[in-house]
Image (cartoon, rainbow, N blue to C red):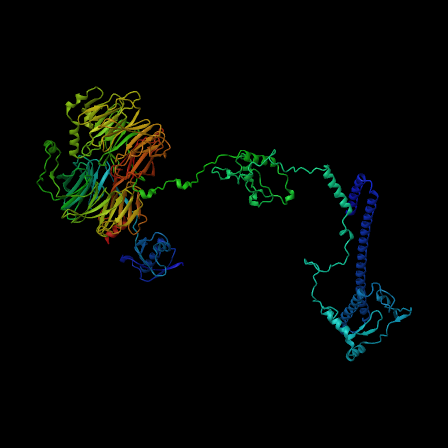
């Protein structure tokens, strides 16, 4: 095939040549033909060699076969001849047979060896007997065994030996063991010493030739070293050292064509420099751009992983669920844009259907790659959580519900604890104010005031025992007589103040009146009639001043400050600054806190000006409490927030706590312990630890410590008021479920 | 390891078994051991009737399997275990239920009469059988505590402390069934929450919400003490309120920062008081000085002292009963905490005749009977009350009493208690 194809090519070329140059045509043709002849000759020679080889192989194999079959036949003959012989000799005989056969083989092999070097003996026959290669048993029944070269019968030797003779022969004849029978002639042959030695060597598996050295040193012909003498002694071809005229002619023609400009060098299509396409990012890592601080390298394609493999490990293949998820997901959200698949071999991998798409995406990545570095802060989320002490270390704080004060029939809007910590006053929508003994939850006194009580406040002065109650448009001063006689007397003295003070502030806003009859018996001592509904009352620490709140959008008359001892009232504000939610006195200094809807204003009562305005970031403040130190304020709001203001720090909340789910109704500070609490409509009270440091540099430590639950949510209202015990870390809460609960 | 070598012994002569080691299964529980002892006693004495026993290993009641108990207590199982057995205290049975008109704030009982103070401003005297004998009315406010002073023959002296800041010393003649207020003890400026009589019956001590302790003479006289009247007090009004002769305190002990909730006499010279300021203080009555302070972490509601084991038991608002050794000087050592109540412990009382047993009442409506040798759980829960329990008492005769906000006073008696008393 090769030759023929070559030939056809050459022929084609030849034809071309012929067209081009007519002059030298004859000569070329002759040469070509010569070459063809040479090729043909070569192939013929090769074929011949092959044939020779196969012939010789055949002969060799046939000869071997012949010898094998011969020996077998001999064996059979022997058997037949010795049928009548004694059994006792059988073993011995068999040994002999082995020896004989091996001897025979040896002979043959020696002959083969000799043949290799001297002459071909492939079809030489044993000419002592001319019967040829036939089973000798065919002559079993004849007296002769075959014919010699002259055509005369070869007679079997006379075998008249019986077993006894055999035995005697065996005993007496020293060469008996080396006597074998020649099958071809049927005569006994005594093996020579050399032959016996040869048999023994063969039996041992050694070479037959004594002089053959099986461990002679090997000669390495084909090594990388260039030897002085060639392995083959073939003379080099003539053409290998004579320059080819044909080639020379071709080259000269090409050179001529190039010179003449007929052949133009091919334009390199890849060299498209600065043409249509160029690598946008080619010099990016070396250019000055790379040293620029905001340099953005081209996005790199992630290296393929096991998922992309054509035969990934099974753990990378999708399970059914993963596949379902993959199919369900939006293409943008998928972890991989393909489904990993497994093929037994790379040949079976089909064309990648998304190839174009993926290339396009890559181009988009490069083209639309962000030109601005995204500043990502590497922060451990754990570090963002402030290091707060554990609630366990912040004890004591209320943890469990201890007592439930039952007796009210309406929702309890307000509670207040006496300064001694023995009594609890509560005002309810059922129109009663109740006084409870804290330690036993016993209601010792009930005062019917005839209206829904909005707020109660116990006078913080321990030397008097008075309770301010806000209901409808009146503020009542109650003297519950639950203290020492001295205290009761002193509070009575306070109430029976100079009557002449009244007309001074007689602007008709407020009407102070003593109570009589039934009300007096119940302990109601004073009634301060307001023009509008009063929402809240708050005492000053000294216990003489009382502030009342009348929320109203459109009026500047929202807050009134009463002096109980002189029965005077005054309106401290001339302008309406918003709906007042709650007021409180500063515990130490002459400041007054007013919480409006969005902010808390702090007024200096001495200078009579606004000191500070706190902006609560909430929509509607519901309640306010002032820290006993006076420098901190907490505000609860209806949008579930609790904001802590540090007055020394800022007018913005120092901390916002958003732990409640619903509107915060009430907040409270503890008088002694660093605790504050908030109550909300979700029925929970959250107690927080709030340490305030004297060191101005240290900010307050605020840790929520406990969520207290117990109140039943009724009419969407949970806990309405919350207050701490003055001396113990206990908290009282009143709820819409008409109960008051004590948590300790 | 399935067998243990154990030696049984008991204090009670009636139930002595041979002092030889027995091999008992390690997994045996109280009932198994009780059966073993009963078998042994039957073998010894044919007329023996089965008795339930409780077992103590190194002073602690066995409540689990013997092997696990020894494992938790770290007792070697190689040696012979010394197991003490005592007759099991049977569950105290409610005997009487005495209905009051209002909440019961306090109870004091002796072998014959029961004195209760109530929120209806009266004190009542009952016989032990539950018969109302006498109503002592005179206070203008809730009676917070009551105490017997002395009983000789038919006349008895008794004390009532009230929210109206006074104490009244009454003389009661049980034959004629007449009660007479002998003295009105004035001086406190807050509600008198607790009162205790000294062992000799000559003095008593009161503790009040005004943070003071006052020592008074308990001997009735016919003369009123001098009282400096405040100038503006209307004398007439005072006269009308007066009930019995005015008495002023012998001594005032001040030192507490909060209300005094409970007071008792350790002996005739020493007063012990518990307060809301988280301390228990010991006072020397002779000099009026404070001797030691035991500081806790929660409000103390009640204390009780047992001269038998010389321990103080305190009940506080954190639901624990704590045992203290009042003789320690540093005063902060809690020997043992008994925890099982779920509300404030409002009353504790040691058994007068048993050094290990005490009874406690709590706001969780339960009265519990404790043995200090089994501190993990009470011996019995007495769940008779339907509301808060405010007071408990335990008389010499083994009668337990408890009263509370359900207006009922229950008496309980445990059979084994009687046995102890008898022995």
Residue B199: give x, y in percent of width and height. 16, 48
Left or right: residue A208 compared with residue B405: right
Residue B225 vertical position relative to residue B329 in the rendered view, above or below: above
Q: Residue B412 falls in which quadrant of the image?
A: top left
As rendered, which of B137 and A15 lies closer to the eye?
A15
Q: Is residue B293 visible?
A: yes
- From the viewer's perspective, is A536 left or right of A17? left
Q: Quadrant where the C terminus of chain A lies?
A: top left
At x 38%, y 57%, the residue is: B26
At 90% from the left and 70% from the top, the residue drawn is: A153
Instruction: Residue A131: name its quadrant.
Output: bottom right
Depth check: give the residue in front, A545 or B151: A545
Q: Would you identify the image quadrant in which residue A743 lies?
A: top left
Residue B374 locus on image (x, y percent): 31, 51
**Residue A336 position in % (x across, y down):** 55, 39
Q: Position of residue A460 (x, y in %)?
A: 22, 33
Q: Is residue B92 visible in the rendered structure shown here?
A: no
């Amino acid at each position: 095939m090769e030759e023929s194809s070559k030939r056809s090519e050459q022929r084609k070329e030849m034809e071309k040549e012929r067209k081009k140059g007519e002059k030298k045509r004859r000569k070329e043709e002759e040469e070509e033909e010569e070459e063809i002849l040479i090729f043909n000759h070569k192939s013929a020679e090769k074929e011949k060699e092959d044939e020779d080889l196969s012939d010789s192989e055949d002969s060799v194999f046939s000869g071997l076969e012949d010898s094998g079959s011969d020996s077998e036949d001999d064996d059979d003959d022997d058997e037949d001849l010795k049928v009548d012989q004694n059994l006792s000799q059988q073993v011995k005989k068999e040994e002999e047979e082995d020896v004989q056969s091996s001897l025979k083989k040896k002979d043959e092999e020696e002959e083969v060896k000799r043949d290799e070097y001297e002459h071909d003996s492939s079809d030489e026959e044993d000419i002592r007997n001319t019967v040829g290669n036939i089973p000798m048993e065919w002559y079993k029944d004849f007296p002769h065994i075959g014919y010699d070269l002259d055509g005369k019968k070869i007679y079997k030797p006379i075998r008249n030996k019986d077993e006894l003779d055999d035995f005697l022969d065996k005993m007496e004849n020293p060469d008996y063991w080396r006597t074998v029978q020649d099958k071809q002639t049927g005569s006994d042959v005594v093996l020579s010493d050399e032959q016996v030695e040869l048999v023994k060597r063969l039996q041992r598996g050694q070479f037959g030739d004594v002089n053959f050295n099986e461990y002679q040193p090997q000669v390495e012909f084909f090594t990388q070293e260039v030897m002085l003498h060639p392995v083959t002694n073939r003379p080099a071809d003539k053409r290998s050292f004579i320059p080819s005229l044909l080639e020379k002619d071709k080259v000269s023609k090409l050179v001529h064509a190039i010179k003449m400009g007929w052949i133009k060098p091919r334009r390199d299509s890849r060299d498209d420099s600065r043409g249509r396409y160029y690598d946008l990012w080619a010099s990016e890592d070396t250019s000055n751009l790379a040293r620029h601080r905001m340099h953005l390298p081209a996005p790199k394609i992630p290296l393929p992983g096991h998922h992309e493999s054509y035969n990934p490990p099974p753990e990378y293949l999708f399970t059914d669920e993963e596949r379902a998820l993959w199919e369900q997901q939006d293409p943008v959200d998928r972890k991989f844009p393909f489904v990993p698949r497994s093929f037994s071999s790379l040949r079976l991998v089909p064309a990648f259907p998304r190839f174009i798409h993926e290339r396009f995406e890559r181009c988009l990545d490069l083209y639309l790659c962000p030109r601005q570095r995204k500043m990502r802060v590497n922060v451990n989320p754990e570090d963002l959580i402030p290091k707060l002490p554990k609630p366990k270390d912040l004890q004591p704080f209320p943890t469990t519900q201890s007592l439930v004060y039952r007796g009210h029939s309406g929702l309890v809007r307000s509670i207040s604890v006496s300064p001694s910590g023995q009594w609890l006053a509560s005002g309810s929508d059922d129109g009663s104010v109740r006084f409870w003994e804290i330690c036993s939850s016993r209601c010792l006194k009930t005062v019917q005031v005839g209206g829904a009580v909005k707020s109660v406040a116990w006078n913080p002065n321990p030397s008097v025992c008075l309770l301010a109650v806000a209901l409808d448009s009146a503020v009542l001063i109650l003297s519950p007589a639950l203290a020492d006689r001295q205290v009761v007397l002193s509070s009575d003295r306070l109430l029976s103040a100079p009557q002449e003070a009244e007309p001074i502030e007689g602007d008709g806003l407020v009407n102070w009146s003593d109570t009589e009859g039934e009300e007096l018996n119940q302990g109601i001592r004073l009634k301060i009639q307001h023009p509008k509904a009063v929402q809240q009352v708050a005492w000053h620490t000294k216990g003489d001043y009382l502030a009342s709140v009348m929320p109203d959008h459109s009026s500047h008359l929202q807050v009134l400050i009463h002096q109980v001892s002189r029965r005077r009232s005054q309106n401290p504000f001339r302008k309406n600054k918003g709906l007042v939610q709650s007021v409180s006195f500063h515990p130490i200094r002459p400041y007054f806190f007013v919480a409006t809807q969005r902010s808390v204003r702090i007024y200096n009562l001495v200078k009579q000006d606004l000191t500070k305005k706190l902006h609560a970031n909430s929509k509607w403040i519901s309640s306010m409490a002032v820290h006993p130190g006076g420098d901190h304020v907490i505000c609860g709001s209806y949008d579930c927030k609790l904001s802590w203001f540090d007055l020394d720090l800022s007018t913005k909340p120092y901390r916002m706590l958003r732990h409640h789910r619903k509107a915060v109704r009430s907040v409270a500070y503890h008088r002694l312990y660093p605790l504050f609490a908030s109550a909300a409509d979700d029925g929970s009270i959250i107690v927080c630890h709030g340490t305030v440091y004297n060191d101005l540099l240290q900010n307050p430590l605020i840790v929520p410590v406990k969520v207290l639950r117990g109140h039943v949510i009724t009419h969407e209202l949970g806990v309405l008021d919350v207050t701490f015990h003055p001396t113990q870390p206990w908290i009282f809460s009143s709820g819409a479920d008409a109960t008051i609960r004590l948590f300790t | 390891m399935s067998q243990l070598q154990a030696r049984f012994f008991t204090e009670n002569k009636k139930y002595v078994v041979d002092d030889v080691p027995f091999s008992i299964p390690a997994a045996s529980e109280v009932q198994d051991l009780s059966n073993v002892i009963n078998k042994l006693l039957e073998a010894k004495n044919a007329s023996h009737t089965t008795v339930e026993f409780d077992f103590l290993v190194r002073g602690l009641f066995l409540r689990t399997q013997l092997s696990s108990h020894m494992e938790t207590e770290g007792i070697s199982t190689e040696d012979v275990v010394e197991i003490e057995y005592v007759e099991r205290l049977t569950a105290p049975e409610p005997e009487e239920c005495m209905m009051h008109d209002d909440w019961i704030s306090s109870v004091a009982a002796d072998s014959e009469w029961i004195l209760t103070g109530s929120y209806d401003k009266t004190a009542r005297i009952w016989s032990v059988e539950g018969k109302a004998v006498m109503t002592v009315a005179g206070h203008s406010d809730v009676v917070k505590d009551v105490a017997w002073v002395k009983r000789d023959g038919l006349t008895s002296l008794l004390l009532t402390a009230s929210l109206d800041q006074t104490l009244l010393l009454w003389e009661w003649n049980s034959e004629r069934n007449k009660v007479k207020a002998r003295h009105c003890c004035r001086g406190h400026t807050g509600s008198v929450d607790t009162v205790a009589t000294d062992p000799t019956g000559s003095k008593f001590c009161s503790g009040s919400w005004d943070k003071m302790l006052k020592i008074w003479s308990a001997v009735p006289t016919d003369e009123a003490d001098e009282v400096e009247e405040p100038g503006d007090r209307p004398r007439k009004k005072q006269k009308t309120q007066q009930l019995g002769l005015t008495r002023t305190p012998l001594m005032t002990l001040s030192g507490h920062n909060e209300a005094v909730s409970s007071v008792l006499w350790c002996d005739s010279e020493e007063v012990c008081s518990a307060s809301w300021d988280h301390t228990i203080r010991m006072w020397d009555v002779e000099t009026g000085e404070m001797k030691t302070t035991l500081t806790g972490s929660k409000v103390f509601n009640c204390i009780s002292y047992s001269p038998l084991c010389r321990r103080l038991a305190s009940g506080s608002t954190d639901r624990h009963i704590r045992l203290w050794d009042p003789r320690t000087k540093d005063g902060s050592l809690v020997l043992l905490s008994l925890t099982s109540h779920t509300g404030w412990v409002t009353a504790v009382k040691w058994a007068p005749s048993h050094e290990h047993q005490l009874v406690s009442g709590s706001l969780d409506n339960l009265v519990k009977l404790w043995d200090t040798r089994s501190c993990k759980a009470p011996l019995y829960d007495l769940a008779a009350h339907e509301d808060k329990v405010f007071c408990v008492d335990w008389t010499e005769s083994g009668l337990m009493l408890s009263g509370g906000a359900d207006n009922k006073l229950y008496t309980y008696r445990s059979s084994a208690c009687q046995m102890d008393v008898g022995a």
